[in-house]
Amino acid sequence: VVHVPAPGRAVPGVVRSADAEGLHLDCSGVPVVVPQERVESAVRHGWALSAHQAAGMRWPAAVVVLPGDAAAGLSRPWVYTAFGRGELHLSVVHGVDQALPHAVAQVPAQERTTRLRTLLEALPTPDAAS
């Protein structure tokens, strides 16, 4: 399973037991108890993650499923992230017709919308400091 303790954070785990207290998980050697009322929102099947939840994790094999309605959201960085999860094997099941090769070949990444560029440009240059 995958424990999602907070939005954007996914931790792989194994179910050890369940009781009135909740679902008992082992997340990389760390015991975690997920209360019954949070199991539905905080625990997912390990085989069914979004590409964003799986970012930073790798498995021996991965299956990437792209239903037809995913076509509009495909981009080269997204494909790279999703397809890079399998170390030895990757299977791709898709119904996005030509959107997949188009995303890899032609769709540029969306420009970042963070304030980092503005903050860095506002810093004084080494020459200006002297």
Image: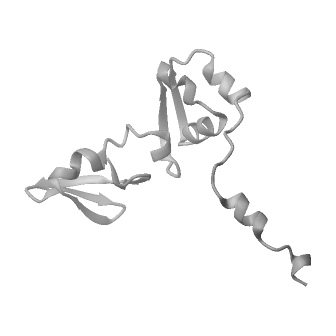
The quadrant of the rendering that contains the C terminus is bottom right
Kindly identify the residue that appears in the image at 23 percent across and 44 percent down.
40
Percent x, y for residue 115? 65, 58
Q: Quadrant of residue 30?
A: bottom left
Residue at position x 66%, y 39% in the image: 110
Residue 88 vs residue 36, the one in the foreground: 36
Q: Residue furthest top?
A: 97
Q: Count of labels shown?
A: 0
- Name of the residue lying farthest toward the bottom: 130
Please say if 107 is above or below 10. above
Q: Give x and y (percent) for residue 103.
A: 66, 27
Q: Quadrant of residue 127?
A: bottom right
Coordinates of residue 6 in the picture (x, y in percent): 37, 56
Comparing 64 with 97, the one in front is: 97
Q: Is residue 33 above or below residue 126?
A: above
Position of 31 with respect to 129 (left or right) is: left
Residue drawn at 49 percent across, 19 percent down: 68
Work out whether residue 123 or residue 41 is closer to the camera in this orientation and state it.
Answer: 123
